[in-house]
Image (tube, coloured by chain):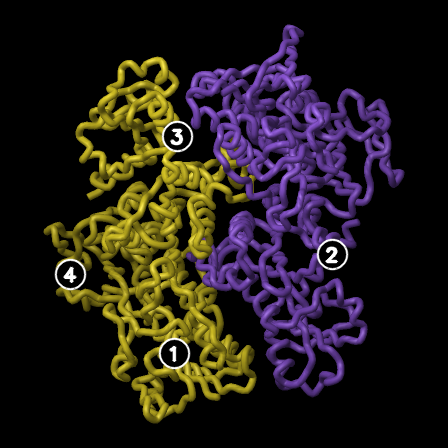
Chain colours: A purple, B yellow
Amino acid sequence: MKLVIVGGVAGGASAAARARRLSEQAEIVLFERGPDVSFANCGLPYHIGGVIPHRDKLLVTSPDRLRERFRLIVRTRSEVEAIHRATKTVRVRDLASGRVYEESYDKLLLAPGAAPIRPAIPGADLPHVFTLRSLADTDRIKQAVDAGVRQAVIVGAGFIGIELAENFVHRGIATTILDRNEQVLAPFDAEMTTPLVAAMRAKGVEVLLGQSAEAIAPHPEGMEVTLTSGTRRIAQIVIFGVGVRPDNKLAVEAQLEIGPRGGIRVNEYLQTSDPDIYAVGDAIETTDFVLGEPTQIPLAGPANRQGRIAAENALGRKTKYRGTQGTAILGFFNTTAAMTGLSEKTLKRLGKPYRKVYVHPTHHASYYPGAEAMTLKVIFDPHTGQLLGAQGIGGAGVDKRIDVLAVAIQARQTVFDLEEMELCYAPQFGSAKDPINMAGFVAGGLLRGDHPQTDWETLREQTDAFLLDVRTREEFASGHVPGAVNIPVDELRARLGELPKDRLILPYCQVGQRGYIATRILLQSGFQAANLSGGYKTYRLFTATHDAK
Amino acid sequence: MKLVIVGGVAGGASAAARARRLSEQAEIVLFERGPDVSFANCGLPYHIGGVIPHRDKLLVTSPDRLRERFRLIVRTRSEVEAIHRATKTVRVRDLASGRVYEESYDKLLLAPGAAPIRPAIPGADLPHVFTLRSLADTDRIKQAVDAGVRQAVIVGAGFIGIELAENFVHRGIATTILDRNEQVLAPFDAEMTTPLVAAMRAKGVEVLLGQSAEAIAPHPEGMEVTLTSGTRRIAQIVIFGVGVRPDNKLAVEAQLEIGPRGGIRVNEYLQTSDPDIYAVGDAIETTDFVLGEPTQIPLAGPANRQGRIAAENALGRKTKYRGTQGTAILGFFNTTAAMTGLSEKTLKRLGKPYRKVYVHPTHHASYYPGAEAMTLKVIFDPHTGQLLGAQGIGGAGVDKRIDVLAVAIQARQTVFDLEEMELCYAPQFGSAKDPINMAGFVAGGLLRGDHPQTDWETLREQTDAFLLDVRTREEFASGHVPGAVNIPVDELRARLGELPKDRLILPYCQVGQRGYIATRILLQSGFQAANLSGGYKTYRLFTATHDAK
């Protein structure tokens, strides 16, 4: 049995190691076009910023280590140029010597990854215009930065772009980041990203939304970037972080099935349309775990899992890949944005029914020093309560809550399960009612009908509604929703006479809790009422979205 | 409908607020014998240590707030002395005035909590001998400490005892902590607590195991505590933290059913043997979520949940309590110990079959600065792989992994699900193969038979086995298991001739991974082999247990 693997980073290296553990007898050949195997892709921006000072830290393993420990045949700087399915061989070019040869396989495993997109705009090929994928890219960017960069433009405010922005701040570089969308971090819902934009601006990063780079031209001070809005910025370095494209050339030429967005199509065993060829990682079309439909989600964790599973199947087991949830996280200094499952905008686009709640808890007991704020958004099926997706933005503890929700989604749990979750509580770590429980209470109350809620987006449509601010006079005075009337919740029972019986009353407070109590009081006193989900803090997330444009 | 609630802290206060949200019409009377309602029990040690400097931070809410917001009738310093089930009344003593009166109820909800045990040893009633349960206890201890305490003895190394030890260290007090068990934190398995003992000793706390206090006597320098071992210690303050006893007096006198360990017996609706009386919190016998059998687990999170559920049922709903998992966490400076579900010792005691694995990962990518070590122990059904329990010890990120495992247990997931979990990964937050995935891989490999493993405990029985250390020469030289032979894993294939074909070979490495590779190589080369679970680090956990006595 001879297994040939194309690509030696996350998925490919995982597959090779797994294959060897399963079989001492198999012949395993690993081709990698670059000089390195299994490097830490996700660490690259931090080496540029000096957070990870030693480059060798990024080398998870070496070709020699793979040879010794796993008895692999590792050929770096070797480009697989073609697959000959009829003869079950691949054509390989040794990039050092130029030699071209054929290598046979019994099973072939493709892990070529995805290539960063370089937009076809004038000047995109200037010397200090980069994309970031490999260690070689990292070296080039770091070299440029070390040689002296005062100003940078990053085109694309996705994960890599924002991580690079943090690292440019570490290096003292005045950084402008653009996104053609009206938000940063496109997989997230826009309102959940507004605190991140605020955090970036607070660190001096210029964030320009709804615009992209139109042209880059040489300039006495480096380059001049012209934006679609006509604005211009001077920079000594420009980075494109506008997304990746599956590296499907080999697969296309071998006439393997390809999905509409370019991903190599695989079945649940990660087998391509040729049963002797498997494919994993950023190059494939995978299955959305929640919807069960095809999707394309380039992430390191799934790539590793897929490598493991494809190796098992190539060696004769029958292991299914369950699909990808899209669990992802970004840190920008002390701000964390994380998500799992489907976003609201994806559900809207697909026309799927959903409900959502927002909670704004602290990451541990508020009475213990150092409690940091977060916002959690939980999206669920309006009938069954099954969890569909979740997003978090804030400081410490966001990663924990999204991980908990990721597991709950994997287990097909509901918002009612969130109410019952028994999580770690000591005041340094959480609360007796954890943020997860709180989200469950709010969502469960909504579905049981105890707690009717209105979303901020629909507020504008309810022009006849009576908007009731139940916060204190001080809170009201320091900012409120236009048109709201202020009756603090603790006075509400005594002042019910001031409220209309024939109009829908929409109470709101700061985060939703007092609004909930007010809603319960009103409903039980013969009024129609619905709490404004997530309170004034949620309103501010949305209005800040508009401010941020 | 008149609901009377006895006890106004976690479960009682939650129940009262929930009851009001469900019904504006209900008459809700809350009796609390102390002066405070709903205070932050779990924060008390940190006020003594000055970590939470302001006492009012510990007051989650006030009687006035409960009156205003929830229109509750709140009577503090009111002791409910008797339940008259026939007349559906309780006898109440107003502790301020001494007045005694009867209060009627339609439904009664008992949330009396549990009282700290004060061992009946000579001197237990000396003035500076304390237990810690209430704010008043906190005030007394803090007053004593503020007045000048140089030396303290804490009897009982449970959660409260160890938290107090940390806070005594903050106050510069030389602290001795004792436990009659051969370990600290009795709910945990002993080997998982040895790093905590080391951390306590590193902070200067004297930890004495397998002994308790026999007598306390006045002494010119304060008190002299004589231990069961004969050792004596001088202290100006002594704290008993030896556990709690359900405060079941009212229930016993009212002839409600009581469990064998003193907890008030309730059904899944938290109803006592009298259908008009509910009970919640530390005073009840609850159901173990994993086993479905009665247990007694005093924890704040479950108490809050129970209060909520009992209120719903008292007001006519039918909500089931699912049982308690026993998720608990302790912080001692930067060391975290957390657990959920069943311990190995509980399973052993019950004679239930199980398997276990240990992993020793870092809390985030090791290539990113600041990665902290942890040990996770995962216990599961040997046939189905269903998760039964988990424990973690280490630094940052232990809470997250135990929360993830708590949810997996709640969802009745298996070790195979752990392999597939898609958790947040960026280098500051986790790894592409998260510690949870790693635990899944090790456990899954064991159950699939790919990865035979032996536990350290059974090593002594396998006297005929060949113990093979597959670490580097340097690692071997700096400490190894007596009798082991060293062949580094990368040399193993070339040196198979040195190994016996007729004996079981037990490879081990530092954490288990190279041992696993060695096991795979050996099995496929015609040897009998089983990896020593968790490697040398796990061995050290066990031998450190013995050192610690």
Q: Quadrant location of residue B263?
A: bottom left
Q: Is residue A70 above or below residue A467?
A: above
Q: Which mark is residue B216?
A: 4
Res. B51 mark: none
* Viewer-proximal residue among A496 and B440: B440
**Label 3, label 2: how far apart the Cα atoms are:** 47 Å
Badge 2: residue crowd in 10 Å (few <14, some 14–19, many ≥20): few
Query: What amino acid type should be assigned to the residue bearing mark 2?
Result: Gly
- What amino acid is found at the position of numbered circle 3 in the picture? Gln
Q: Amino acid at mark 1?
A: Tyr
Chain at tag 4: B
Q: Residues within 10 Å of mark 1 (few under 14, many from 20)?
A: many
Are the residues at dot 2 and dot 4 in contact (C-beta closer than 8 Å)?
no
Query: Foreground residue, B330 or B278?
Result: B278
Question: Judging from the image, what secondary structure is the residue with disc 3 in?
Answer: helix
Q: Which residue is mark 1?
A: B278
> Which quadrant of the structure image shows residue B334?
top left
Viewer-closest of B59 and A240: A240
* Quarter of the figure that contains the C terminus of chain B: top left
Residue at 40% across, 61% down: B42
Closer to viewer: mark 3 or mark 2: 2
Of discs 1 and 2, which sits in the foreground? Answer: 2
In 3D space, how far apart are the residues under numbered discs 4 and 3 (Cα atoms)? 51 Å
Q: Are marks 2 and 4 on the same chain?
A: no
CB within 8 Å, label 4 to label 3:
no
Q: Nearer the viewer, mark 4 or mark 3?
A: 3
- Residue matched to label 3: B513
What is the distance, in whole Å, between disc 1 and disc 3 at their CAs?
Answer: 51 Å
- Label 2 marks a residue whose chain is A
| Cα–Cα span, label 4 and label 1 | 40 Å
Residue that extends furthest to the right in the rendered view of this protein? A230
